[in-house]
């Protein structure tokens, strides 16, 4: 069983722990750390872990094999490199980093140290994503034409001033780092790399200094097109539409439902078995650390997601100019 440390204790660190602690035979969180002593004590009491005073102490502990990073976005690259230097396997929450150059540096550090690097894009594990990928590979869609994604929550309406997310440095293009990056990963997994981006991002409803309404048009390297909308001030909405010359499909309800339409029939619901995607990604991470198959989200793919996010931010800042993904 992989012995991991939870680093950076907030809402999502609890979600990761809830998914596996006492339930998984593959991974166990044995300790935690945060700058807040209160958060360390609360997490340790809730999940039955030890606690370390700081990240350096975690990395110096020979009994800890891996770190689960849910720290602020701007710290991911440095924290990954520190873990790699200490010989610890790394699971880092999305976005991998805020800059593609930082991601490439962190990837190189993990590769050079021989440690596993996994980025938490859990929608790769969703049944609708896997089903759509299988349909595409089987040729059921014909020529891929267009893909649409939407992910909205009203999270930013409740962010207090001073919260680490509540600024444009940590949350460029509003919901992109928290929500939209999930959809970028999903659509690139299905349609391949994105070549060009045109985007708009605005602050409409939130009171903290960040955007809450972001949309982007994509041109894929394949020639297909796409659209992404991601909002941080609207009720929960999550869906994906895939359009091909033979078939169109709709994935909704957090990618747990799928409806398929053809020229001759539809819409036809396609039954899907719900799974805990967070537990699935953490257990696959543990299996990779144990010498199993590579983690399904390759570091290069996670880096491309960051490059797309950078292009969205640049396009929005430059008056919706078309920006090439670097």
Image (cartoon, rainbow, N blue to C red):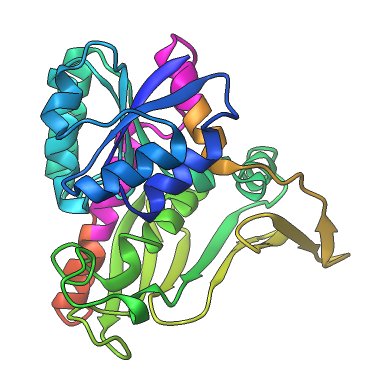
**Figure check: 82 above or below 17:** above
Q: In percent of the image, x 45 and y 69: which residue is there?
A: 227
Range of the magenta residues?
284-309
Quarter residue 277 falls in:
top right
Asked if residue 321 shows in the view, the reply is: no
**Figure check: 240 above or below 110:** below
Q: In percent of the image, x 48 and y 23: which residue is there?
A: 27
Q: Position of residue 304 (x, y in %)?
A: 29, 45
Tell whether position 307 is magenta: yes
Q: Position of residue 285 (x, y in %)?
A: 44, 25
Asked if residue 60 shows in the view, the reply is: yes
Q: In percent of the image, x 52 and y 67: which residue is there?
A: 148
**Figure check: 71 above or below 85:** below
Tell whether position 52 is magenta: no
- The residue closer to the viewer here, 4 or 223, is 4
Dominant secondary structure, magenta: helix
């Amino acid at each position: 069983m992989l012995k991991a440390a939870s680093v950076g204790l907030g809402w999502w660190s609890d979600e990761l722990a809830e998914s596996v602690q006492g339930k998984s035979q593959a991974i166990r969180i044995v300790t935690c750390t945060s700058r807040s002593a209160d958060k360390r004590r609360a997490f340790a009491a809730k999940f039955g872990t030890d606690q370390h005073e700081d990240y350096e102490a975690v990395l110096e502990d020979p009994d800890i094999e891996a770190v689960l990073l849910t720290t602020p976005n701007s710290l991911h690259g440095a924290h990954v490199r520190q873990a790699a230097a200490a010989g610890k396997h790394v699971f880092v929450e999305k976005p991998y980093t805020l800059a593609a150059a930082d991601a490439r540096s962190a990837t190189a550090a993990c590769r050079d140290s021989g440690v596993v690097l996994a980025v938490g894009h859990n929608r790769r594990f969703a049944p609708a994503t896997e089903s759509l990928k299988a349909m595409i590979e089987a040729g059921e869609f014909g020529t891929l034409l267009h893909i649409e994604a939407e992910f909205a929550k009203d999270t930013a309406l409740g962010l207090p001033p001073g919260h680490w997310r509540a600024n444009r440095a940590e949350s460029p293009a509003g919901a992109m780092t928290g929500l939209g990056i999930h959809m970028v990963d999903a659509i690139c997994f299905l349609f391949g790399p994105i070549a060009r981006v045109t985007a708009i991002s605005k602050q409409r409803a939130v009171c903290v200094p960040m955007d809450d309404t972001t949309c982007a048009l994509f041109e894929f390297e394949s020639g297909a097109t796409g659209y992404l909308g991601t909002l941080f001030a609207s009720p929960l909405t999550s869906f994906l539409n895939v359009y091909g010359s033979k078939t169109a499909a709709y994935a909704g309800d957090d990618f747990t439902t799928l409806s398929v339409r053809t020229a001759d029939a539809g819409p036809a619901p396609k039954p899907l078995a719900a799974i805990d995607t967070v537990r699935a990604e953490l257990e696959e991470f543990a299996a990779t650390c144990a010498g199993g198959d590579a983690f399904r989200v390759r570091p290069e793919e996670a880096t491309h997601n960051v490059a797309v996010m950078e292009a969205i931010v640049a396009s929005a800042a430059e008056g919706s100019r078309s920006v090439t993904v670097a």
